[in-house]
Image: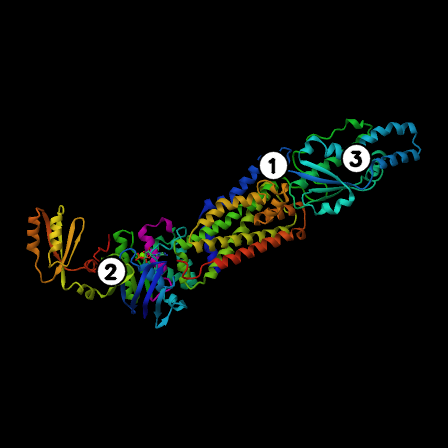
């Protein structure tokens, strides 16, 4: 029902989003994953008609929304990455203002406010000024304000940034529940792998403005199906050891972290004993060597050579 | 929708009591401080900024009129001896000479009054010369009738014709005060004369240039409290524009503006919401501060229709500034313009507009510049209303304010960014 076609945005010389193709069907939870600066927010701003794309199209029910976005705006609820609320007003005053912006009034508005406050768990704080809220409460209200007009599609841009684990779980559960109970379609943007793994049916992965992978969780993980990941932990690294790993012809990729070296090798190769021998040769004490099943993090690592979160 | 936006701006403003206190409390305090601290200086002889140029035209001939008066005494059968004796006293009483030498020519007055004696033929030129504060015309037979009044108790006291330059603010007050003193002096002279007191005993009062000003004609006097009530109010109302501009830019910065746009509210509705908030809050601000000045300082408005006309026009002009600041800060995605306005421009405009001292009285050019600021035009109109001028005489200032508002709104509308540019 919603489709992005070759969507691109250039800021001066910088390509923030390049030829993004994406579709969202009714009732899905779609994940848009990527590190900071990948172009997720830019993509969402174009999708929701806040900025005009340099190139490409946003299509809703097979109609272009670039010139006349009003029908799209009616059915989407956008949760911006920033807390877009009036800090000096109360939760209820914020909701009433934004509800009026969406042309709700009277008892209908009142009922809707009560309902949403209940959903985001802020009923007993409705008369409090937003300034006094915790980060998690503000995030919840930020979401609630986008739900007042009963949007068919809710678009969330990193809705859990900078909050405590409880609030985060609460938000994740709420999103899942809204999807289940109200068949709400969700586009969920995050740089947290585990959130996207938990919530989403289909996932798009972006990096540096490019779409680097897309599909269901399983499809994406299958990118790694021919490979496996070995994680090596040691007190300190020895250059000789790293060099020998890199030189080994069967190794596809070596990534050196602070406490951990990740080695990607073909699935059929058994390198366990070889690694232990290399460590002995280099006079290096190992803490552990684990063979892991792939995660989305590994997929990202595989595709870009960088960790998702630096 | 526009109403919702205005209502919400008001709510945000009300939630910031410190802001309100600064907007409303500050001018009230400043009026008190400035009118007591600077009031004396403003009216006193010490101020170098006050320079009053007065033209004096004699339509008659004082010497001839004195001779005619003496001749008449003789005709009425007064003994020659007695007339001879009176002659010296009468020479001393010659009102025009007294005005020139003892009143305008006194040491205090000379510090800031420049008296030009001109011929009646030069009058047309002087009317066009804005540097003159007042023109004093001595009608024919003024001396003659004054002497009749003073010595013979005839008729009533003749009057000087005084025309004032309404564009200047303090100058006319000073001239009026001087002339009032003069008139009182003459009346006192008559009193003394009648009671047989020696004319030489009369001295021009040394203290006439301090204290409250009085005017000669029926118009109202302006005191320092009134002056500063107007000056501080028109300056402070400018901050409403920057306050609204700041709130509006905050809405962009925290992406609330995005939410409003996503609600299918056109950016023009938002634009008009900002304009109306600026106008409405300025109007309310002016009413509150003037209301306070009325209760606390007794600043009363003789003509409410004129007062509301000027107040409404000034409020629209401030609304125009508010929406202009908003549009520019949206366009450049920076609050700098608003901060520059509240930090520097307001002060400059306040000085030019005469909020701190009547800067325009010293130069016609500065006066013109001052009247080209909305606060200055507002101030000139308010002072004219207080002086008793009617609405026709302030219409050019009102017209300027409305044009200023229209220009600001048009420039704002042109610079307000289109969708997609507002990133
Ligand atoms: N208004 C803008 N002007 C210039 N560059 C921008 C602008 N907005 C975003 N960018 C750049 O575009 C890239 C993508 O940004 P963004 O979409 O915010 O990434 P993400 O949301 O994935 O963290 C970043 O390099 C960012 O600096
Ligand atoms: Mg982002």
Does the Cβ of the disc 3 residue fall within 8 Å of ligand 1?
no
Q: Residue at x 58, y 56 (%)?
A: B403
Q: Which residue is mark 2?
A: A196
Quarter occupied by residue B67: top right
User: Is residue B126 within the magenta segment?
Assistant: no
Task: Compute the Cα span from label 2 to label 3.
Answer: 100 Å
Q: Residue at x 31, y 52 (%)?
A: A136
Q: Which residue is mark 3?
A: B95
The chain under label 1 reads B
Task: Compute the Cα span from label 3 to label 1.
Answer: 31 Å
Magenta residues span A130-152
In screen coordinates, is A24 left or right of B240?
Answer: left
For the N terminus of chain A, the image quarter is bottom left
Counting from the top left corner in percent of width and height, residue B111 is at: 67, 33
Q: Which residue is mark 1?
A: B39
Which corner quadrant of the figure contains ligand 1? bottom left
Counting from the top left corner in percent of width and height, residue B166 is at: 67, 46
Mark 2 vs 3: CB contact within 8 A: no
Badge 1: few (under 14), some or many (20 or more) residues near its Cα, within 10 Å? many
Q: Secondary structure at mark 3?
A: helix
Q: Secondary structure at mark 1?
A: helix
The chain under label 2 reads A
Q: Residue furthest bottom?
A: A62
Labels 1 and 2 share a subunit: no
The chain under label 3 reads B
For marks 3 and 1, the one nearer the N-term is: 1
> In front: B33, or A247?
A247
Badge 2: few (under 14), some or many (20 or more) residues near its Cα, within 10 Å? many
Q: Nearer the viewer, mark 3 or mark 1?
A: 3
User: Is residue A138 within the magenta segment?
Assistant: yes
């Amino acid at each position: 029902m919603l489709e992005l076609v070759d969507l691109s945005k250039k800021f001066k010389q910088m390509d923030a989003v390049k030829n993004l193709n994406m579709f969202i069907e009714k009732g899905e939870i779609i994940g848009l994953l990527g590190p900071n600066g990948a172009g997720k927010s830019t993509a969402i701003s174009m999708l929701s008609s806040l900025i005009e794309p340099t190139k490409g199209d946003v299509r809703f029910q097979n109609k272009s929304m670039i010139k006349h976005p009003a029908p799209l705006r009616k059915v989407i609820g956008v949760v911006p990455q920033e807390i877009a609320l009036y800090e000096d007003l109360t939760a209820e005053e914020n909701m009433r203002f934004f509800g009026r912006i969406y042309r709700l009034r009277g008892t209908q508005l009142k009922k809707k406010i009560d309902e949403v406050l209940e959903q985001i768990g802020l009923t007993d704080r409705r008369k409090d000024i937003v300034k006094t809220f915790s980060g998690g409460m503000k995030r919840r209200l930020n979401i609630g304000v986008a739900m007042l007009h009963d949007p068919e599609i809710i678009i969330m841009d990193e809705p859990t940034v900078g909050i405590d684990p409880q609030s985060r779980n609460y938000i994740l559960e709420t999103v899942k529940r809204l999807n289940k109970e109200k068949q709400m379609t969700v586009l969920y943007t995050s740089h947290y792998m585990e959130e996207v793994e938990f919530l989403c049916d289909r996932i798009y992965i972006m990096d540096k403005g490019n779409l680097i992978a897309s599909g269901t969780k399983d499809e994406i993980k299958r990118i790694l199906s021919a490979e496996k990941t070995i994680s090596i932990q040691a007190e300190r690294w020895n250059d000789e050891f790293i060099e020998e790993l890199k030189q080994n012809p069967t190794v596809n990729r070596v990534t050196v972290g602070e406490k951990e070296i990740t080695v990607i090798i073909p699935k059929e190769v058994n390198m366990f004993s070889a690694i232990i021998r290399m460590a002995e040769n280099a006079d290096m004490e190992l803490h552990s060597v684990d063979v892991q099943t792939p995660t989305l993090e590994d997929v990202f690592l595989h595709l870009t050579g960088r960790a998702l979160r630096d | 929708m526009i109403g919702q936006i205005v209502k919400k701006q008001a709510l945000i403003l009300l939630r910031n009591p410190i802001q309100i206190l600064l907007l409303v409390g500050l001018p009230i305090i400043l009026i008190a401080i400035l009118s007591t601290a600077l009031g004396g200086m403003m009216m006193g002889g010490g101020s170098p900024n006050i320079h009053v140029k007065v033209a004096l035209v004699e339509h008659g001939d004082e010497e001839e009129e004195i001779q005619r008066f003496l001749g008449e005494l003789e005709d009425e059968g007064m003994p020659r001896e007695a007339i001879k004796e009176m002659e010296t006293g009468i020479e001393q009483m010659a009102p025009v000479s007294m005005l020139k030498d003892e009143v305008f020519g006194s040491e205090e007055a000379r510090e800031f009054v420049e008296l030009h004696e001109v011929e009646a033929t030069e009058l047309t030129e002087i009317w066009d010369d804005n540097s003159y504060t007042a023109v004093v015309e001595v009608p024919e037979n003024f001396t003659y009738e004054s002497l009749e009044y003073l010595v013979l108790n005839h008729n009533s006291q003749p009057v000087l014709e005084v025309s004032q330059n309404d564009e200047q603010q303090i100058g006319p007050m000073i001239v009026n005060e001087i002339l009032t003193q003069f008139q009182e002096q003459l009346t006192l002279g008559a009193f003394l004369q009648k009671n047989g007191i020696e004319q030489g005993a009369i001295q021009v009062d040394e203290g006439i240039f301090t204290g409250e000003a009085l005017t000669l004609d029926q118009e109202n006097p302006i005191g320092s409290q009134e002056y500063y009530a107007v000056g501080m109010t028109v300056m402070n109302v400018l901050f409403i524009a920057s306050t609204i501009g700041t709130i509006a830019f905050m809405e962009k910065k925290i992406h609330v503006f995005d939410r409003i746009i996503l609600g299918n509210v056109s950016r023009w509705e938002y634009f008009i919401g900002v304009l109306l908030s600026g106008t409405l809050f300025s109007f309310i601000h002016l009413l509150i501060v003037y209301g306070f000045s009325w209760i606390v300082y007794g600043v009363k408005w003789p003509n409410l229709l004129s007062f509301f006309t000027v107040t409404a026009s000034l409020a629209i002009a401030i609304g125009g500034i508010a929406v202009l600041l908003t549009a520019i800060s949206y366009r450049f995605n920076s609050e700098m313009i608003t901060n520059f306005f509240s930090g520097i421009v307001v002060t400059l405009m306040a000085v030019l507009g005469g909020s701190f001292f009547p800067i325009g009285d010293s130069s016609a050019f500065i006066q013109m510049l001052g009247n080209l600021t909305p606060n200055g035009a507002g101030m000139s109109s308010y002072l004219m209303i207080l002086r008793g001028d009617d609405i026709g005489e302030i219409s050019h200032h009102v017209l300027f304010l409305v044009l200023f508002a229209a220009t600001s709104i048009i420039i704002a509308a042109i610079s307000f960014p289109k969708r997609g540019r507002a990133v």
